[in-house]
Amino acid sequence: MRDNRALFAVRCGAFLAHHTASPRVTALSSTSTLSPDAGAPPSSTAMTPQERRSSASLALIFAFRMLGLFLVLPVFSLEARKYPGGDDPALVGMAMGIYGLTQGILQIPFGVASDRFGRKRVMVLGLFIFAVGSAMAALAPTMAWLVAGRALQGAGAISAAVTALLADQTRDVVRTKAMAIVGASIGLVFAVSLVLSPLLNAALGLSGMFALTGALAVAGIAVVLWWVPAEPSKHAGQVSVSLGASLAAVLRHPALLRLNVGVFVLHAVQLAMWVALPTLLVQAGLPKDHHWWVYLPAVLGSFLVMGVTLFPLERRGYLRAVFLASIGLIALVQLGLLGVASGAPTVNGLAFLLFVFFCGFNALEASQPSMASRVAPASARGAALGVYNSLQSLGLFTGGAVGGWLVKSHGPQALFGVCAVAMLAWLVVAWPMRAPRAVAASTAPKAG
């Protein structure tokens, strides 16, 4: 099964590379920072072998980690009822959401630690904590222990360190492509988990699925140690600024503030949608066991659209236009879902809206962390991506909590109306951003 997940991540990387660049053979020193002089001309949009290796290996780490999380979500609320205390919906909701809360709190410390002590050390530590939390959840005798295990899983907050390492090991000209490979691996894992979750739950049960999650985390540690290229020496134990100075630089940066607001809104809206969307599909006549018939084509189709539109437009200097258009698309999707929820939903209508949503979502998932890594101060990149990933996790937590309350108190129409307003507010916040310089430039473009 591990080979299947690796194959998905590698195929995704190969697909994106095929549609955006031709391969070039280059050798890089394992201790040097990746630069335009490291085997590829500054204007080359082809990924070097080292960049492809970094992208594929770090995407696989994300895939291992996220697969374990996604597998349990479709069955969690039903299986949790079998535990003592599982008849309390608030406790079940806490067990589902506390992962995002602890991860959101700890992303900044882990990101800063990766600036000070090295990315790979922090990644190994975080994956170990995640594995221990998975073991605790697998052995949990009650809901209270299950909550504790989920909280410990979230404490392994390595997203900032992984993203920062990918930024360290790729040039600006190919960074959006590299981030897209990671984002695509997560999207594919999400789609696959919707298919595998009921089958694995029947075979292993919830505790067995948590044990599988822990095994995937251990596999991720092996990937970090033996496949991920060595990190640049400037991040292997060196520190140029204090913790307070790096955080202050990040929190005062106007371009980063806009991106941080955006990632919070995007993931709050994403999770809030899933509070009501499965019910709409059931109302449209699609049994819950067949929902993947809609999800999987929507996700795969959106990857195809992204591969043949985002990267060519970015190379031509239209990243700002794509970015703003993607925000607008998701706002329109929320308005479309508002209309569907107010009438009689159809499977074809919901499938089309989901396809458009994933087109916008995947473009933003690829471009936002790339832009954050470009505009962040080099000495505080881990801190900047820590703040970014913290707000991403807190957005997920907020989306689930507020989305559930809105549906319970005011119905799905209120949920989609609030999501549409949130996306439009983000569009207003993002509008002043300056268009990045052409990505073929040898220096990092600025976005603000």
Image: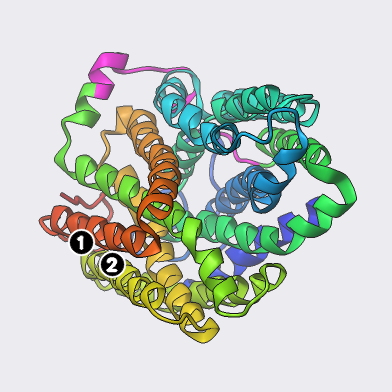
Magenta stretch: helix, strand or loop mostly: loop
Whether residue 287 appears in this view of the structure is: yes
- Which x, y percent locates residue 197? 74, 56
The span from disc 2 to disc 1 (Cα, nearest Å) is: 6 Å
Q: Residue at x 46, y 65 (%)?
A: 46
In the rendered view, does 91 fall on the left or right side of 244? right
Residue topped by disc 2: 331
Element marked by disc 2: helix
Q: Are marks 2 and 1 in contact (CB under 8 Å)?
A: yes
- Which x, y percent locates residue 109? 42, 21
Q: Residues within 10 Å of mark 2 (few under 14, many from 20)?
A: many
- Which x, y percent locates residue 132? 71, 24
Residue topped by disc 1: 424
Q: Residue at x 80, y 26 (%)?
A: 139
Q: Is residue 339 above or below residue 209?
A: below
Residue sitting nearer the eye, 99 or 251: 99
Residue sitting nearer the eye, 135 or 272: 272
Instruction: Identify residue type, mark 2.
Output: Ala
Residue sitting nearer the eye, 402 or 296: 402
> Which residue range is magenta in the image?
228-247
Q: Residue at x 26, y 49 (%)?
A: 444
| The magenta stretch spans residue 230 | yes
Q: Residue furthest left?
A: 432
In the rendered view, does 34 fall on the left or right side of 79? left
Q: Residue at x 48, y 33 (%)?
A: 161
| The magenta stretch spans residue 37 | no
Residue sitting nearer the eye, 147 or 120: 147
Quadrant in which residue 156 is drawn: top right
Instruction: Identify residue type, mark 1.
Output: Leu
Q: Is residue 219 above or below residue 16?
A: above
